[in-house]
Image (cartoon, rainbow, N blue to C red):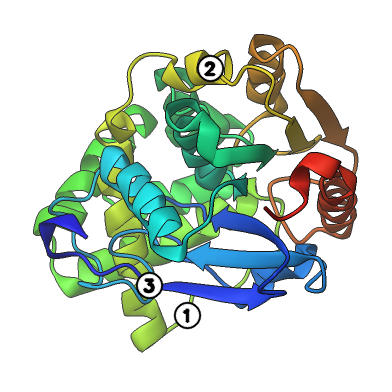
Amino acid sequence: MSGGHRIAYTQRGNPAGIAAVVFHGGPGSGSSPKQACFFDPAVYRIIQVDQRGCGLSEPAGELAHNRTQDLLADAEALRGHLGIRRWLVVGGSWGATLAVLYAARHPAAVSGLLLRALFLCREHDLDWFFHRAAAFYPRPWADLSAAVADATPGKLLASLKGIFRHGDSAQQCAAARAWFAWERALGGLAAEAAPEGGALHALCRRYRIQRHYLANACWLGRNEVVTSCARLGRLPVLFLHGLHDAVCPPAGARQAHRACPDSVLRIVAGAGHDPFNPTMVDAMRRGLTEFSARSSFLPP
């Protein structure tokens, strides 16, 4: 790949099945074998990709030549490398953002999209995550604010930028632990201690990449994700969104759905941002079963 990056990917399921690429979230999270649990391995050829600097991709945590446009180019290069004519594009949160952007640029390469918890990456969305949500989750926000020594929620992202660019290891680890707790709170997950040792350093790399993207608005124009949804034409598109998602509130998915008139939106009661909430797992599996039933999804 360009810029000295080496992209890791895995393939699972049926090699002759319906090709489906999975874009992980974050930015910076990396893929997990658990994300394949939504798919019937007898039906799907499941391709999971670690984005630049993430997971097993190398160099780990590298920020140079690591922008949204690079990730989109990597996905298209991988499709060519694997000899896939068209694939179903599946993504959650930031992964859903990438899926929309990719499909708008390469519609002939896409057979459909399954978009869970779409992140629109607008100033409004970042303001919610780093500012306005503090009113609803005061304790985890106070811990995050204390970890970056900044009592002003509107300045959190700028402070995190300074820590992950210039802070020492102890400062970065403290910020990563607090950011981890903040994400779990908004995601509707039970409090859990952050990992330690090598896993903690991997968490720091994850948030260093996430800070890099969010501090630059992911190099996207104003409302570019919604505009890209409007360019999806007649592609089959399914939006799934947890009713109680406080990381990416459902209003964003509703707006994207309105921009994509042939799409289907399902608000999943009982689910938040967690992809492995049982009701969301059921919704994902149902959606993938429906996609596989379409004759246009049969392997070429």
Q: Secondary structure at mark 3?
A: loop
| Mark 3–mark 1 distance (CA, rounded to whole Å) | 23 Å
Residue that sits furthest to the bottom in the current view: 197
Residue 114: image quadrant is top right
Front: mark 1 or 2: 2
Of residue 120 and residue 48, the one placed in the foreground of this image is 48
Q: Is residue 131 left or right of residue 116?
A: left
Q: Is residue 230 left or right of residue 239?
A: left
Binning the other alpha carbons within 10 Å of mark 1 as few (below 14), some (14 to 19) or many (20 upward) gives some
Q: Please provide percent x and percent y for residue 253.
A: 68, 25
Residue at 32% in and 71% down = 57
The residue indicated by pointer 2 is 226
Q: Is residue 72 left or right of residue 191?
A: left
Tell me which amino acid carries mark 3.
Answer: Ala
Up/down of 259 relative to 191, above or below: above
Tell me which amino acid carries mark 1.
Answer: Pro
Binning the other alpha carbons within 10 Å of mark 2 as few (below 14), some (14 to 19) or many (20 upward) gives many
Label 2 vs 3, first from the N-terminus: 3
Q: Is residue 251 left or right of residue 168?
A: right
Residue at 68% in and 38% down = 112
The residue indicated by pointer 3 is 8
Label 3 vs 1, first from the N-terminus: 3
Q: Are marks 2 and 3 in contact (CB under 8 Å)?
A: no
The residue indicated by pointer 1 is 195
Q: Please provide percent x and percent y for residue 136.
A: 64, 34
| Mark 2–mark 3 distance (CA, rounded to whole Å) | 29 Å
Residue at 33% in and 18% down = 221
Residue 193 visible in the shown view: no
Label 1 vs 2, first from the N-terminus: 1
